[in-house]
Image (cartoon, rainbow, N blue to C red):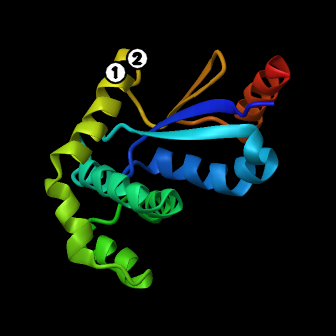
Amino acid sequence: MPAVPAVIFEDLQCPDSAAFDRMLRESLLPRYGNRVSWEHRDFPLPKHSWARQAAIIARYFSELDPQLGLDFRSHMLADPKAPDFPLRLAGFTRARSLVTSEAAAALSDGRLAALVDKDYRDGLAQGVAKTPTVFVGNETFIETFSVAEISLAIDQAIAAAA
C-alpha cells in the first residue's frame, strides 16, 4: 500500500511550527512510520527575520542528505525565538563536522531560493496564511491542533487508500 501523503507548510522560526515538529517526532512518526509520507514545504512568514534564510539552508542540507535537512529543520525549530541565526547555523554544522561557510554560501544560491519561493507561492495558492498548515487527505490543519485531531484524519486517509 502506498504511503498517504501529508504536506506540511512550515516556518522554521514559528513557535507553532516548532510545536508541530515536536508532535511529529514524538507522536506521529512513531505511530505511523512509513504509512505516511511527510512532505516539508517552506512557508517563511515575512514577520520572521531569519525564517527564509533557514529554509534556504534546509534545502542545501536536504540535497546533501535528506535526513540532514530534516535534522536541520528540527534544530532550528527547537528554539524558534533564538535571535542569532549565524550562531545556530555554526552550532549545527560544528556538531556534524560540516563546514559552516559552505552552508552559509547556500544563501547566495538562487536555485535554492527559488525552490523556497515556489513553496511559498504554492502555499498562497492553496490558501496557506499561517504555519504550520498541514494537508492530510481532504482535511486541513492550521496553526494549532491536537495529535488526536490529525491522527483521525491520517487514519481515515489510510483506510481510504486501502
Q: Is residue 94 above or below residue 86?
A: below
Three-letter amino acid code at the position of disc 2? Gly
Three-letter amino acid code at the position of disc 1? Leu
Q: What residue did someone put label 2 on?
A: 127
Residue at position x 33%, y 66% in the image: 82
Q: For the C terminus, give its image quadrant.
A: top right
Residue at position x 33%, y 50% in the image: 55
Front residue (pair 122, 85): 122
Q: Are marks 2 and 1 in contact (CB under 8 Å)?
A: yes
Q: Is residue 119 above or below residue 73?
A: above
Residue at position x 26%, y 65% in the image: 83
Residue 133 appears in view: yes
Please provide percent x and percent y for residue 160: 81, 17
In the image: residue 16, left or right of residue 14: right
Cα distance in 3D space between marks 2 and 1: 5 Å
Residue 122 picture quarter: top left
Please provide percent x and percent y for residue 104: 21, 67
In the image: residue 75, left or right of residue 160: left
